[in-house]
Structure formats: structure tokens, C-alpha cells
Image (cartoon, helix red, strand yellow):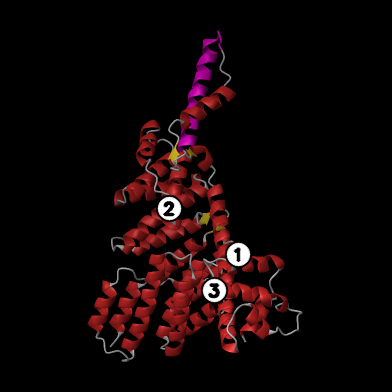
Amino acid sequence: MSFKKLKIIISKFNKQEKSQLELFLNSPFFNSYEKCGQLYAALLPYLSENEDEKPPLKEIAQACGLRPGNSSLSVYLSKLLDLVEEFLVQRELRRETATRQCLLMKGLASIECQAMAYDVPKNGRTKPQKQSIQYLLDDFLLKNTQLQTSQNSQSVKQRSHSYDKVVSSLNAFYLNRILKAYCSKISIKNVYGLGETPDESELLLQLSKNIFAGQDPLSQLYHYAVLLTKEASEENFNQLSDLLDKFQNRIERSDLSILYSIALNYCIRQTRSGKSNQEILFEIINKMVDNHALYEGQYLSVNRMSNIVAIVCDLKKFDWCETFIKEHYRYVHPDFREDVYTFNMGSVLFNQKKYEAAHEMLIKAEMKDLHYDINRRTILLKTFYELNEELALVNHAESYKAFLRKNKSFQKDNKTGLINFINITQGLFKLKHKFSKSTKETFRKKIEKQTTIFNKKWLLQKLDEVK
């Protein structure tokens, strides 16, 4: 049986993929069984789709140094099949990682100011060039200013006025580019966890406050955006929000996207801590939609879309969610477009307590995006819990845990948090159906004691529902 499965899989490989698999099997990092590599090399001539000849398994087993008998060969065939499946997982992971990095780099490339406003010294730390504004001003004036000595005092006066105007405009232009780059770095750090948190906010705040005295709209907006990232206060948020309402029609989409994202992230943190009304979140989201400020570069981010759907589902505005998904999923990158539609519609159905429909929506597709697949599996586990499907819940839980353990790209803390969530969901199911001797209070302490666990709020809510 293992040989037939191997043949089905490997017969679909091209020459390059077979070579990559051979390297994978010869790597002690992935394969600790040297004989599996030897077995693959011996079986390879018989693994072609058009090859009908049955391999001489006994001779192959002896050549690979396996013990006589079918049992030893079966064990190593099974191990080889597991390794081939692991190779497929790693291959898809590399493709997905490459795609995500490509999309991220496209988003970064769309922020034109990055290369101009920042340099990377030898120690690898990113800092703004403090002389860059003056340098760029001097360069511009040397190349473009036509001020010459003139005996006509009126002419000199007019040209001096033009000179001051150019200086002022260039100062505003280059400062705004640096502020934009700084805020972009903050957003990327918060969303993707990439890079260090930049520490130049004091310099930028002084520049935006003192040089222009708040005359330029974009400088004002970025001034309060930087302030809000530095000090998350209601006053700074209100200032940024008011300025966005005032100048939104005069600001480019790429700037609006960054500025609204900073306002939105502040609202999310406040809501999670119980200090803010979720309706403010909904208001910010509507403004982002109305002003076409949802996009990062050319596409709508998959993470941004799922975050928006999750926020609005908490507000029970399900009709708005469905309309939003149907109208905007087409603006997601084509590699993830169907995943985004399937997952988010399934998420809305789950939040509407239409568990059967949510199951049908989520079960029919395999997600290309790792984080979407994790969220899909999590919602499916909750769905089986709500539907009281014991066998489906147990099978899905074991499959989910195996998937997490195999996935080497997932951070250890995230993996631990998800496995703890799966185990406690299974325990909660037993408590719900009187299969467990634990009391509700014992179980509550167990949940609250966990420092690394996902969906703690949902688990406590379900515990309260247990009679």
C-alpha cells in the first residue's frame, strides 16, 4: 500500500522535484533514517507513472541492508512515505513564504520614500539621515535655481521670494516622506513583526512641529500619527481623527492607508483593554472603505480583510460583513483570493451560529496562506464543539495538532498556545457532556492559569454555558 501511494505521488514530480526530494532525503536535518534515502534511490526506477514492472522488493531490501522479511521493508516504506509527505509540506511552505515575502516587498516598494529617507549603516541599524533634508535642498537648488546677480533690485526681490517658496515646499515634501517612512516602519513592525522599533520619533516630532509650525496638512497628520505611536492617548487620537476628517480629500491614498491604520490599531488596542467603544472602530473602518484607504500597495491585504471582518462580526453587523466580502475580495492578490472569500464567509456564518453552513463553507477548500489555514482549522474545531460532533471533534483535534507539530515555520509560543487551546476545547467538550469528573471551577482555574493559550475569551464563554 505504501509503495502504491509513493508511486502516485512521485510519478507526478518533474525532474527538478525528484532531485529536490533526493536532497531532502539525504539531509540529516529532515531524515534521520539513512536507509530511507537508499530505499528511495533503489525504488526510483519503478516509480514512474508509465512503469508497470513490479519492483523486486526482497532484492531491494537486501541491497539496502534491511532485515529479511516483509515487516522491516514495510516499516521503512512507511517511513519513506511520511518523509515524502513532509517534503510536500515543506515545498508548499517555501512557496507560500516566498509569495508572502514578495507581496510584502511590493507593499514596501510602493512607499517611495524608503530609499531616499533612510540609510542602513554597517551595524545594520536603520536610522534617518539627519542631514538628508539639507543635502537634498542644496542638491535641488544647485541644479534648478537660476538666481544670478542682477542690477535690477526688483528682479532680485522677486527671485528671492521664489527661492523661499521653493525651500519651504521642499522642506515640507522631504519631511513628509521621512515621516511616512517612519510610520510605515511602525505599521510593518506591528503587523508583521519585522525589524526593530525605530527610535527617531523625537527628532521627527521636533522637525514637524518647529520647522513648519503646523502649516502643512500632511505634516500635521504625520506629526500626530507619530505622537500616537509614541504615546497612545485619547487626545492624540482625537487630534489625528479630526485632521483626517478635515484633510482626507487632499491626501493621497497611500498616505491615508498608513494614517488610518495607525488610528485603527489604536482603537483595537483600546477596545481589547475595555477602554473604547467598538462603534469607533466601525466608524474608522467605514472611513477607510469610503476613502479607498484599505490597500497596501496594489492589493488589499489578506490580514487586513480578516481583521475587519472579525471586528465587524463582534458588532453583529453581519449584512455589512457579507457585502464587504463580496465587494472587496476581488482586490486581494489572486494567489489568495478564493481563500479569503471562503474563510471570511465561513467566519461570518460561524458568528451567525449557522454552524452547518459554516462547516460546509470551510471544509471544501485548503488554504494556501498558513495563517488563514490555522484560523480555518480553529473555527472548524469550534464548529464541531457547537454541533456536539464528538468523533469529528476528536479526529480534527488530532489532525490539527499533528499539522502544528510538523510545521517548522510556526513560532514555538504560537504553536504551544494553539495546542493548549485544542486540548482544553477537548476537555471542555467532555465536561459539557458529563464525560469528565472535573468541576466548572477547577476547569476555570485551569484556563485562567494558562499564560500561553489562544481564544481564552471563547473558552471562558463556553465554560459559562456548561450546566
SS at circle 3: loop
Q: Residue at x 44, y 41 (%)?
A: 123
Q: Are marks 3 and 2 in contact (CB under 8 Å)?
A: no
Residues under labels 1 and 3: Cα distance? Answer: 36 Å
Q: Which element is circle 1 on?
A: loop
Give the residue at the far left of this rendering.
Answer: 441
Q: Amino acid at mark 1?
A: Asp
Residue picked out by circle 3: 33
Real-space CA distance between mark 3 and mark 2, rounded to the nearest whole angstrom: 40 Å
Q: Is residue 372 visible?
A: yes
- For label 2, the residue is 189
Q: Quadrant of the C terminus?
A: bottom left
Mark 2 in CB contact with mark 1 (< 8 angstroms): no
Residue 169 x, y percent position in the rendering: 49, 31
Query: In the rendered structure, which disc, 1 or 3, sits on the residue that comes first in sequence?
Result: 3
Give the residue drawn at x 42%, y 87%: 387
Residue closer to the observer: 439 or 74: 74
Name the residue located 57 percent from the left edge and 52 percent from the top edge. Answer: 106
The amino acid sitting under disc 2 is Lys
For discs 1 and 3, the disc positioned in front in the rendered view: 3
Most common secondary structure along the magenta stretch: helix
Instruction: Report the front residue among 69 and 180.
Output: 69
Residue matched to label 1: 335
Residue range of the region highlighted in magenta in the rendering: 149-176
